[in-house]
Image (cartoon, rainbow, N blue to C red):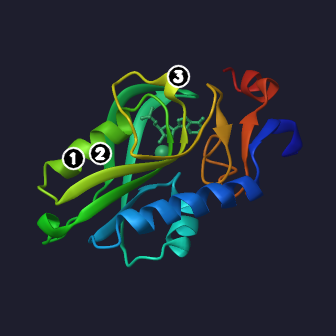
Amino acid sequence: MLESLIDEVLVTEEELDVIVTRLAQEISRDYADKNLVLVSVLKGSIMFTIDLAKKLDTVCEMEFIRTVSYGNGTEFSGEVNMLVDFDRPDFAECDFLILEDIVDSGNTLKFLVEHLQSKGPKSVKTCTLLDKPSRRKVEFEPDYVGTVIPDKFVFGYGLDLFEKYRDVPFVAVVSPEYLASRGL
Ligand code: IMP
Ligand code: MG
């Protein structure tokens, strides 16, 4: 069943572990004397957030945010809306690091950076597990990138396929047959 959805496994479990370990080392080093607050973008970043946080050598706090980008199938309209936000009394003392599963058009992270910046924090940076720079529609450069991937629709390790298969432990490219069967 799952096999029929997969065109190819793009990032294996072992490769994910190497990538997340490297990011955790970089972030631990860069945030050693900062007030790190991870901001996990639900739902796609859940696996990444958990695995990264467990590998950090520095103290951190965690916040969760949820956005929805309207569109259908694999294309997004560019309009980003906030479904879940957080509040806290000490924004001015926080070094926020937004954790995303994937950067595509760049709309979501650009919106979230501006949203957090408007609250007057000490700093805001971004970390994405996957980056599809060839899909950018707005100018946006993440501060930390796990790995760059080609312009293909992927799922697994938190990323969904019509809300399913977030639990798949690796990142796979969706088969063209499956996309065609959904009219995409
Ligand atoms: P944006 O276009 O950079 O704003 O990305 C919007 C959101 O689209 C991301 O946070 C993902 O949740 C989702 N997304 C983009 N590309 C993919 C993909 O290949 N698979 C699954 N979700 C994706
Ligand atoms: Mg997402």
List x then y, in percent, for residue 15. 72, 53
Nearest the eye: 128 or 159: 128
Residue type for callout 2? Leu
Distance from label 2 to label 1 (Cα)? 5 Å
| Residue holding disc 3 | 134
Residue sitting at x 66%, y 37%: 154
Q: Quadrant of the C terminus?
A: top right
Task: Give the numbered dot on residue 112.
Answer: 2
| Residue 48 located left or right of residue 68 | right
Q: Is residue 141 visible?
A: yes
Classed neighbour count for the residue bearing mark 3: other residues with Cα under 10 Å, few (<14), some (14–19), many (≥20) = few
Residue type for callout 1? His
Query: Which element carries disc 1, helix, strand or loop?
Result: helix
| Residue holding disc 1 | 115
Classed neighbour count for the residue bearing mark 1: other residues with Cα under 10 Å, few (<14), some (14–19), many (≥20) = few
Farthest front residue?
29
Residue sitting at x 21%, y 46%: 115
